[in-house]
Structures are given as structure tokens and as C-alpha cells.
Amino acid sequence: MNGSCACGQITFTVTGPVQGVSVCHCTTCRKMSGFAWSSAYAPEEAIAISGPVRWFEATPAARRGLCPTCGAFLFWQAHDEDTLSFALGALDGPTGLTLEKHIFTGEKGDYYTLADGLPQKD
């Protein structure tokens, strides 16, 4: 799978096994994305990134990778994990992936409902 930010300065390729296809509804992801953040993860060594990623720590638990030019929120990584999450919306072309769950639903906005029948985790 190949992906990129909106301006094209950052590109990435995922070659490893993809897992955890989910939508995060936490307050930070909602603020950074404008709604909710859909992602999947793979082993860090299975994701090749090219371009000037700016890493930002919005919380003590993780860092987020952004494009310094267009502001795209592309990556998320917990400090104690060797996997890297990537934005599904940044993938180029069909993904072949299927959403598995919603996470941090206890923090979701009150302006929408989750009615797709997928598992929801607080």
C-alpha cells in the first residue's frame, strides 16, 4: 500500500502485515482530524516514510506524525510499541481493508451516532 499527505511532500509505503483497522474517537484525534481518525497499524520496519514528518506529542503516551506543510495527520505511535499506525484516508487507491472496530467511543462527539454494528471500545 502507498500513501501520501495532501500536498505530496510526505509519501509512505506499507509492506508488512496490516492490523487493527479502526476509527479513533478520542478528543485529541477529533481535534487533529476534524471528526475521527481512521487508521491501521503495521510493524514499524514495514513502513517506509519519505519526506519531512514533524513528530508531535499531544499526549504523554504517544507521538503523532504530521506534514509540516499541509498539516495532514498521518501517523500515530505509542512510545512503548514497535508498530506504527497510519491514516487510512492518506492511502492512495483502494485499500482492500475493512473497518474492524471503533475505539475511545466514550470520548466521541455528541453530534453523530455509531450505527454500523461494529464493536465499540471505550
Image (cartoon, helix red, strand yellow):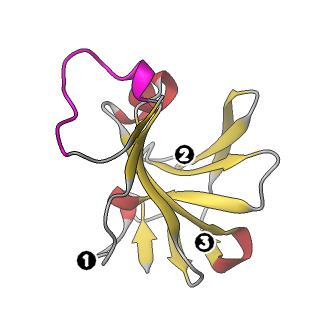
Kind of residue sitting beneath label 2: Pro
Percent coordinates x, y for residue 29 in the rendering: 46, 33
Q: Secondary structure at mark 1?
A: loop
Q: Residue furthest right?
A: 80
Q: Residue furthest top?
A: 110
Percent coordinates x, y for residue 67 in the rendering: 52, 50
Q: Residue at x 25, y 14 (%)?
A: 110
Percent coordinates x, y for residue 101 in the rendering: 38, 49
Q: Quadrant of the N terminus?
A: bottom left
Q: Residue at x 62, y 55 (%)?
A: 53
Report crowding for label 2: few under 14, some 14 to 19, many 20 or more residues within 10 A (C-alpha): some
> Are the two marked residues, 3 and 2, in contact with CB atoms closer than 8 angstroms?
no
Kind of residue sitting beneath label 3: Ser
Q: Which residues are magenta?
A: 105-116
Kind of residue sitting beneath label 1: Pro
Q: Earlier in the sequence, mark 1 or mark 3?
A: 3
* Main secondary structure found in the magenta portion: loop
Q: Which residue is mark 2?
A: 68
Q: Residue at x 67, y 37 (%)?
A: 56
Q: Is residue 68 above or below residue 88?
A: above
- Is residue 122 highlighted in magenta? no
Q: Which residue is mark 3?
A: 50
Q: Which residue is mark 1?
A: 94
Q: Is residue 92 above or below residue 85?
A: below
Q: Secondary structure at mark 3?
A: strand
Report crowding for label 3: few under 14, some 14 to 19, many 20 or more residues within 10 A (C-alpha): few
Q: Nearer the viewer, residue 117 or 37?
A: 117
User: Quick check: can you spot residue 13?
Assistant: yes
Side of 79 where 121 appears, left or right: left
